Structure formats: C-alpha cells, structure tokens
Amino acid sequence: MQANGAGQGQDSELSCLNNSAQNGESSSAGEAHTNVNGLSTTNNGNSVSNNDGIPAPAASNNTVSSDANSVKKKKCLSQSEEDVIRLIGQHLHDLGLNQTVDLLMQESGCRLEHPSATKFRNHVVEGEWDKAESDLNELKALMHSPSAIVRMKFLLLQQKYLEYLEDAKVLEALQVLRAELTPLKYNTERIHILSGYLMCSHAEDLRAKAEWEGKGTASRTKLLDKLQTYLPPSVMLPPRRLQTLLRQAVELQRERCLYHNTKLDSGLDSVSLLLDHACSRKQFPCYTQQILTEHCNEVWFCKFSNDGTKLATGSKDTTVIVWHVNTESHQLKLMKTLEGHAYGVSYLAWSPDDTYLIACGPDDCSELWLWNVQTGELRTKMSQSHEDSLTSVAWNPDGKRFVTGGQRGQFYQCDLDGNLLDSWEGVRVQCLWCLGDARTVLASDTHQRIRGYNFEDLTDRNIVQEDHPIMSFTVSKNGRLALLNVATQGVHLWDLHDRVLVRKYQGVTQGFYTIHSCFGGHNEDFIASGSEDHKVYIWHRRSELPIAELTGHSRTVNCVSWNPVVPGLLASASDDGTVRIWGPAPFLDVQDAEGLNECCSMDS
C-alpha cells in the first residue's frame, strides 16, 4: 500500500527519528517515558535497574556508544516499514495495549498519528464540539483539499445538533441549525431533513427517524470514521486499517482459489492468517457419489429444481423421473415417474416455484407436457399443430406464462392451460430463455445468433452472433452472462450487456449433438459441460482451461446440472442410460487426500 504523503513536508516528525540514545529524549509526541513495561532508565543512560530494584552493571562508554549506534541504525526505517509499525500500533491501541504502543513508537522513532489529529480525536470522543471545530483550523494546513473542512464541520455540527435534540435542548439545537449549519451553505437538502427532527416527540423517535445510534461512544466513533476519510493517512490512519488489509488479502486469495466453492465469510475469525488459503480438490464435486440406472435408454436431459430438493431427468425411454434430493446426505431417491412422452424427453423446465414441470420432445415432436410435480397429474398437454416442433421451453418469471418453440418456425407464449397468448412467426428456435424483466425472451435460432424478443411492444434485436450453430445456451442468475454450446467450437461465454464474447473454454468435444452446459457452484463461479468424449468438464469461470475432467460415463454426456442450493452437488445425464451424481470425495486419510490432490482428472 502506497502511503499518502500529505502533511509529511510540514512535520518532520512523521519520518523516522535519528536521535542518539545518549540524550535520553523520547520520540513519542514530545513526552518523556521514564517507565515503560516496568523498565526504568536514568537520564544519562549509564544506570539501569529492573523491577526488583537490583542495579545492573554500569555500562562502559564504549558499550553506550555501541548501543547508541545500534539504536540509531534500527531507527533508519523505510517508508513501508514505518507504515507497518503504525498499522501494528493502531491495532494494538484498538486492543487497549497502550503501554505497548508507547514503547513501540518510542523504540521505532515513529508516531502513530499527528498531534493535531490526536487532539481532534479526543475532542470528538468527549463531545467537546467547540474545541473539535477549532482543531479543524490546525488540520486544514495538513490536508490535500482544504475545502473538505466545510464537509467535516458540517458533520461535527450535525452530531452536535442531534445530541442537543436528544437532551431536549431544543433552543440550543435550533441555534446550531440557524446560526452554524445554515450559514455553511452546504447540503441544504440535508438541513431541511435535520430541521424536521425538531418535531420528534421523544429521543427514541429521533434515533429511529435519523437512523442514529444516539449520544455516546457508538455514534461518535462512527462520526470519527467519516471524518477520517477527509484526512490524509499520514495525519490519521483510516480506522481498523490493518484488519481491512488482512481482510482484503484473504478475500483475494479466496477469489484466486480455483476450487473455492463455499460462501465467502468476510470475517477474519473464520480463517488462519498463518497460512495461505487453499481449497483441496477433494472438497470439489469430482467424485461419483451415486449412479441412477432407472432409465432404460439414453438420458437426454437433467435439471435440479430451483430449491435444490428435486432432480428431473428425461429420457429416450419416454419417461420423466423426478428424484428427491436429501440436501444433507446428498443421496437421491426416486419420487415419481411421469410417462407417456411418445417421442422421448429432450428438454425440461421447472416453474419458478417448482410446482410445475414442462417436458419437451425432440425435433419431430409437436406436443408439450405440463405436469404438476406434487400430484403427478398432467395439467396440460399442448399441441397447436401436428406440423409444429416444440423442442424448447422457458418460464416467465411470474410463473403464469411460458414460451415454447422449435425449428419449424413456431414461437408461442402460452398460459398454464396451454392457451395461446401471443405468437411470433418465422422464428426457427433452437433454445429459449426468459430474462428477469418478465418482458424479454432470448431465442437462439438457425442463423447462428441469439435475439431478444419483447412480446409487449413486439420488438426484437440482435444480441449474440456466432459463426457456427448455437446448439443450446443458458443464462446466469443475474442475467448478465450467457453460456453457449456452439457446434464444433465448444463452450463460449458471452456478456449480454456489452454483447461481447468473454471467453472460449477449452477441452470439450462438441460436434452437432445438442449438449447442455450450466453455471454452478457458489456465486456461479464455475461452469460445467458434457462432452462427446464421454467426460464432464468443469472450468472456473475465469479460466479457459478445465480444472477437472470427470470420467465414468461410457457414451456422450448430453447434459449437466449443478444444484443451485448445494454447491457441492452436480448431476450428469448420458447416452449410456445413466445419471451420475457427483460430489466431494468420501472421507480419506490425510496422505490419501494429498495424493489425490495431485491428480489432474477424477476417475469414477
């Protein structure tokens, strides 16, 4: 961290002191320390006694001279070394170890903060507002932007005004408002708000309306934190600066960790500062936990419900199986089998509340099934025309409508009973997605592009243009990123807002089969995709190279789905007729775990 040099030119005490040890002078804000941590010294430095009163042998002149030179050398500190000492000093001060701070500053020849800043801090904490206001004149010369004095003065007077109101000193508060705050001609909108607090009937009402902690240490400390932002760090350190730096370092290490897949805890108490952060591969969903074999033909699709408690799988065998997910044991049990999809099931979509599940078939299927998952009843079987091809579907966020379409030029918006609400002619749809604005529908078409369609004003626009067919795509929860499986190219990441290609992920084998990839893990930091080489590939969103290649399937992996609630649970569906559930490694000895960490790919 580069220190802000403001104020250093005016006060040489900010740099390390080169005083000789023989003169006995203290470097701590001009105050002599004759007793530090139980050690006392005479002014001439020749006699030293300890707490037991036993005199130590007198040092010779040569020894004194040698010690003085040694101390002098220690005090020649670089700027970064001084900064570290000040940071440590501030942290120790916050812990109440003031004697230790005094000794540290004295021995190092540094100073924790400028004397004017110390005085200002004390006056603010004690609520001596007139003195604190006077201190601003001394601080003005040490600041980069003297105009900031007005803002600081405004904050001081605001606290003064609120404290008068809390003490029921309405006349004094009114005087501050009229004679001190208003003449500043700063933030008049805030002054109007402050004047409204005069109508508060009691202190609790004032604190609630002002969102203020009330008179005392808490509000004054918060005020100091705001005031400090206007002062250079050479004059007064930002509050809890060492903790802030440590927290930033921990967060950066977590962000750079390829396998970090848990919620980020911003506190420092949950980590060790003695070691670098590193997550093990064995904590990542790289290991087969369960193989689901109930389907009797190719499994074309799989999708976890939005609440993570169910998994739906669709197969060429004409069935949809809904599995219950135990979010603690990560084991799945068959819940319901939904039958009658004559052409097989190639796509599934959960309603936003997970009440309904829509099933679509392959290209030659003109029907769509809408199931009530809880009851297992078929609510709607929709078919507009036998010439239709309804291969893809997406729910509107309101859960009352959905859009569906296919490659024969049909694009419909329907209600839960299958009634046609709107249609868009001539759009050969490959894949669909409804954005969170409840108006825009994204559709990939046979022109190798993704366009946005607005059913309210009947407008459309181009968003993504690829050079090869887009076989499928999915969108991140925040609606910003789109993940495309592109024929012969693999997996591409697009920024929908900026309309730019962000990254091309390497390793996956993608021909002209429809393969569905997904975002997943905590904060959707990871990307997973099936592949025609029988593997599941996982990438960190920032890295083009895969961080894991999961083997175990014996034929093309058509679809992957990451549990949205349990970040360590991943499902994959394959032409081999199975669905694999991937999770962290089972319990292993330390040596076994270390050995597995060196592996580049995970066998089943």
Image (cartoon, rainbow, N blue to C red):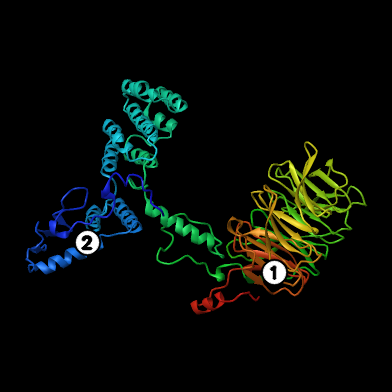
Q: Secondary structure at mark 2?
A: helix
Q: Name the residue that disc number 1 marks.
A: 507
Residue placed furthest toward the front: 9
The quadrant of the picture occupied by the C terminus is bottom right
Q: Is residue 245 left or right of residue 326?
A: left
Characterize the local packing of mark 1: few (<14), some (14-19) or many (20 or more) Cα atoms within 10 angstroms.
some
Q: Is residue 186 visible?
A: yes
Towards the viewer: 377 or 212:
212
Going 38% across and 23% down the picture, which residue do you hit?
183
Residue drawn at (30%, 32%) of the image: 133
Q: Secondary structure at mark 1?
A: loop
Residue 234, placed above or below residue 530: above
The label nearer to you, 2 versus 1, is 2
Up the image or down, 309 lies above or below 235; here it is below
Q: Is residue 92 left or right of residue 326?
A: left
Q: Nearer the viewer, residue 159 or 563?
A: 159
Q: Position of residue 250 (x, y in %)?
A: 46, 59
Q: Is residue 72 above or below residue 120?
A: below
Rendering coords of residue 234 (x, y %): 34, 47
Residue 539 lies left or right of residue 237; in this view the side is: right
Q: Amino acid at mark 1?
A: Gly
Numbered badge on residue 529: none
Location of mark 2 (residue): 72
Label 2 to label 1: alpha-carbon separation: 61 Å
